[in-house]
Amino acid sequence: MNSPPFISILILAVATTLLLSQSTAEIRFSKIHNDDRSIIPLDDFGFTHTGHLNLNFSIISHSNPTADLSLIGFFLSTRDAWFHVMDQLQQHEINCAINSQFIKKVITFNELNQLNEDQQQHYTNLSISDSNQYTIVFCNCIKLKISMNIHTSMYNLDSKSNRDYLSAGRTNLPTIYSFFFILYVFVTCIWIYIIYSKLLSVYRIHFFMLAVVILKTLNLLCEAEDKSYIKKTGTSHGWDIIFYIFSFLKGISLFTLIVLIGTGWSFLKPYLQDKEKKVLMIVIPLQVMANVAQVVISESGPYDQEAYTWKQVFLLVDIICCCAVLFPIVWSIKKLREAARVDGKAAVNLMKLMLFRQYYIIVICYIYFTRVVIYGLETITSYRYQWTSVVAAEMATLMFYGFTGFNFRPKSHNPYFAIDDDEEDEAANEILKLEDEFEL
């Protein structure tokens, strides 16, 4: 591999991430500029019965100060309540969502004084006694062009009356990430011991695997600290920047590792073919784009117009990356199947084929679970149990790392190289019987 292009891409991506990282975490600042959308969802939060919403906004300008300002304002709505509101609007029972009895009204513009003056600061505090997941919505039923700055702060009170800025279903994430961080420290120590004890059987890929595990460990540490600071203060105090960096490095290194193992680099041959290099040169820039999209989504808020576009970009490039890393494994399986038929080392090629076929299946299962099943789990799970999707994703990742490490660990009798003569003869007689099993 030619290292300078990879280094340049890494530097560019890290610099871009740093430029975009202006974290506001759970205390969020939003800007609306000449926006006439009738409904603008701003942010959501899982409240307990001790929940509070602090809303501070300054109206910079609006197009018609004489309009009916009772139809403009902020309200809170649950997902179920919003279905009822939409039904009321369709049945013409109400003329504006803010007039529905199913929502929690926060404030309307007709309640404000001297609205036509610039830079008027308005502040309101709302206590939430009905625990649920609410979305704070700006409603503009008369579709005036409005520009304003919005500051929202949502939190729950714990048993000691301290503010907890993490949503009800995410308040234990610092503990969860800390637990997995400790697990990965243990895994890292085990892998270092394996490398040290099997130095004669160690290849470059094993050191790369160690780097991937270390990056994942550091990523979990930053995630734990990031969520811990948000829980206490509502902001991440710069931990988000470090988290984005390690998240970017971890993502690229993991996809690169799958490609390298799938091509047999360092195990089967000490080089990469041109088409395999092209896969890496496609996957790494796409991962850069995916990480930039992740930062934009995190910093802009989930309902921002630009963030929605970036979310689609993130999903698209992530799917492309997931598909791209499968091609080298398929190529290796095809070559090994052909070699098992014509090569004199039948048992060697047979075992290689079995291992790569297993790895192909596991990679597909891992990608499907972390991209599809986890998303479904987040969608159907109650807001109080949002942490379960995090646990499921981290457990799947740990199992995938464990499977990869166990099957491609350094050992003196490597299945790629050490085969007895008896095993060779037996495998040669069985290859034809097993061909159908290896068909993809």
Image (cartoon, rainbow, N blue to C red):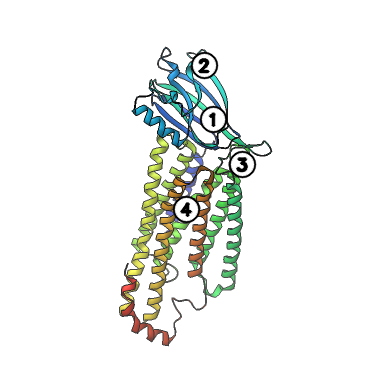
Q: CA distance from mark 3 to mark 4?
A: 24 Å
Q: For mark 4, what is the residue?
A: 251
Q: What amino acid is at disc 2? A: Leu
Compared to residue 86, the image places residue 224 above or below, namely: below
Crowding near the residue tagged with mark 4, few <14, some 14–19, many ≥20 C-alpha atoms within 10 Å: many
Q: For mark 3, what is the residue?
A: 229
Q: Is residue 178 left or right of residue 326?
A: right
Q: CA distance from mark 3 to mark 2?
A: 34 Å
Residues marked 3 and 1 touching at CB (< 8 Å):
no
The label on residue 152 is 1
| Residue 54 in which image quadrant | top right
Q: Is residue 135 left or right of residue 175?
A: left
The label nearer to you, 3 versus 4, is 3
Q: CA distance from mark 4 to mark 1?
A: 32 Å
- Considering only order in the chain, which callout, 1 or 2, is on the residue closer to the N terminus? 2
Q: Nearer the viewer, residue 336 or 391?
A: 391
Q: CA distance from mark 2 to mark 1?
A: 18 Å
Q: For mark 2, what is the residue?
A: 112
Residue at image point 54% right, 59% down: 213
Q: CA distance from mark 3 to mark 1?
A: 17 Å
- The N terminus is located in which quarter? bottom left
The label nearer to you, 3 versus 2, is 2
Q: What amino acid is at disc 1? A: Thr
